Amino acid sequence: MHNNIVSIQQQLKSLNFAETAKIVPDLIQKAELDDWTYHQFLRELLGYEQKRREEKQVEKRLKWAAFPFHKTLNEFDIEEQQSLSRRQFKQLGELSWLDQMFNLILLGPPGVGKTHLAVGLGLEAIYKGYKVSFISMGELVHTLKTEEITRKSQNRLKRIRGSNLIIIDDLMFMAMDQREANLFFHLINDLYNNASIILTSNKGPSDWGELIGDPAITTAILDRIVHRSEILYLNGDSYRMKHRSSIFEEETVQN
Ligand code: ADP
Ligand code: MG
């Protein structure tokens, strides 16, 4: 009996049913104890393999995305963000903009939840089967500049170019030189019409020119990004400041 199961496990493994191979002894035992029909047994076995494969795909896509933190849309308190209605928020979470390859530009001062919202939408996209990449603008410029030199940058850019959604966080935080602006333009051009982009920034498009430098490149980049995009202005006080922890007891502060 034991040898039989071991050989079944080996067969499952050679057929790439590695996940099922691990649990098949338990499954057989359960089937025998509970008098499962053949039909039921087969359905359980295939269902398990399918579920595990999907879970592993999600895990893989999560790892690829390289989010800076794991915060979902459920954790986003829409009451705190008055500039976005409940309906708009729900609509964003449904991701039809992603199917239509719309870009989202999230603008607003620091601490209002731009990165949180972008990550939350990215997570939602991953659960729905999309490939997502998250990268800060600073990291992106560095990665583009080292693409020819390091395998790590090459792989990162390959993933970015193969993603359905690319989140570029904190755009234009630093001024770019001509070469950097060119590299950035070429990437945006590659992504244009193939993927959605979420950009977050504390500066609006009208200030981007000054940071990118070259007006021709800025116009070309803006054209492609803004052409099919939704611009969302987040405002309010910094959530970090409002909800910061204090080292003092409340009464001490008041005294
Ligand atoms: P930004 O990118 O705009 O600077 P973040 O997204 O990093 O801001 O938000 C700062 C912190 O405040 C994060 O920990 C984030 O989870 C939290 N935060 C901001 N807005 C909200 C909100 N509406 N609901 C829940 N948490 C929020
Ligand atoms: Mg941020």
Image (cartoon, rainbow, N blue to C red):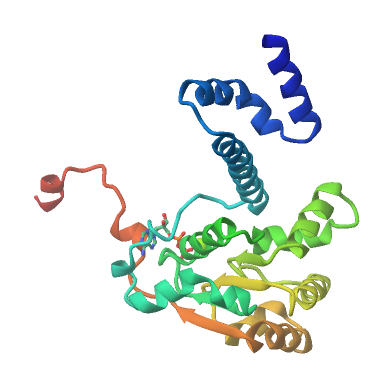
Picture coordinates of residue 199 (x, y %)?
A: 59, 72
Picture quadrant where residue 203 is located: bottom right
Asked whether, in this view, residue 84 is left or right of residue 199, the answer is left
Q: Which residue is located at x 67 percent, y 10 percent? A: 2
198 relative position to 218: left or right: left
Q: Using the image as rendered, state which of residue 27 and residue 223 is in the foreground.
A: 27
Can residue 191 be seen at all in this image of the molecule? yes
Residue 64 in the image: x percent, y percent? 68, 50
Q: Residue at x 73, y 81 (%)?
A: 213
Q: Vertical placement of 64 versus 105: above or below?
A: above
- Residue 198 in which image quadrant: bottom right
Which image quarter: residue 186? bottom right
Residue 84 in sight: no
Residue 49's spot in the image, x, y percent? 63, 39
Q: Is residue 110 left or right of residue 132?
A: left
Q: Position of residue 135 (x, y in %)?
A: 65, 59
Instruction: Report the side of 220 relative to 100 (left or right).
Output: right
Quadrant of the frame with the N terminus: top right
